[in-house]
Image: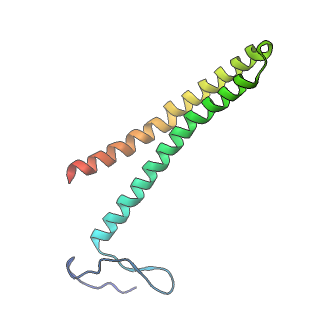
């Protein structure tokens, strides 16, 4: 791969791929744009995972309670309570720090602009 000496104004504004699918020449502005796009995608995926982690057990719990006969409800509610405690532990130990990290980076980058 050949490196060309160009100023940012002379550099191309698009990412071009060679025949062997390697990036040939990318200027610094495109690299920052690609990084910002990927960080935004990761943040969106984390938010979706966070929402699904909370909403799916609640919805399934509602369905179980709704379709269960009243005399069989007590053991199922105890089981749902333990599932919700596991979800709470997962969210507080794994997803919460990841979300804080992503939001801190995202809003920190916006304040620099």
Q: Position of residue 1 (x, y in %)?
A: 40, 85
Query: Could you say which is closer to the camera, residue 59 or residue 13?
Result: 59
Residue under the point 79% across and 18% down: 69
Q: Is residue 61 above or below residue 31?
A: above
Q: Position of residue 6 (x, y in %)?
A: 23, 83
Query: Could you say which is closer to the camera, residue 22 or residue 13?
Result: 13
Number of numbered discs present? 0
Q: Is residue 64 above or below residue 74?
A: below
Quarter of the image where one finds residue 73 = top right
Quarter of the image where one finds residue 12 = bottom left
Quarter of the image where one finds residue 98 = top left
Residue under the point 61% across and 25% down: 84
Q: Position of residue 50 (x, y in %)?
A: 51, 39
Residue under the point 38% across and 60% down: 37
What colour scheme governs how the chains and residues are painted in the rendered image of this protein?
A: rainbow
Q: Position of residue 94 (x, y in %)?
A: 51, 37
Please identify the quadrant where the C terminus is shown. bottom left
Residue under the point 24% across and 84% down: 5
Q: Is residue 113 above or below residue 66?
A: below
């Amino acid at each position: 791969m050949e490196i060309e000496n160009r100023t940012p104004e002379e550099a191309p504004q698009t990412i071009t791929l060679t025949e062997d699918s390697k990036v040939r020449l990318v200027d610094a502005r495109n690299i920052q744009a690609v990084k910002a796009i990927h960080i935004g995608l990761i943040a969106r995926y984390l938010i979706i995972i966070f929402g699904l982690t909370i909403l799916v057990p609640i919805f399934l719990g509602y369905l179980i309670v709704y379709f269960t006969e009243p005399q069989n409800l007590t053991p199922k509610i105890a089981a749902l309570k333990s599932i919700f405690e596991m979800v709470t532990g997962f969210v507080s130990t794994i997803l919460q720090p990841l979300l804080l990290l992503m939001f801190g980076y995202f809003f920190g980058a916006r304040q620099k602009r």
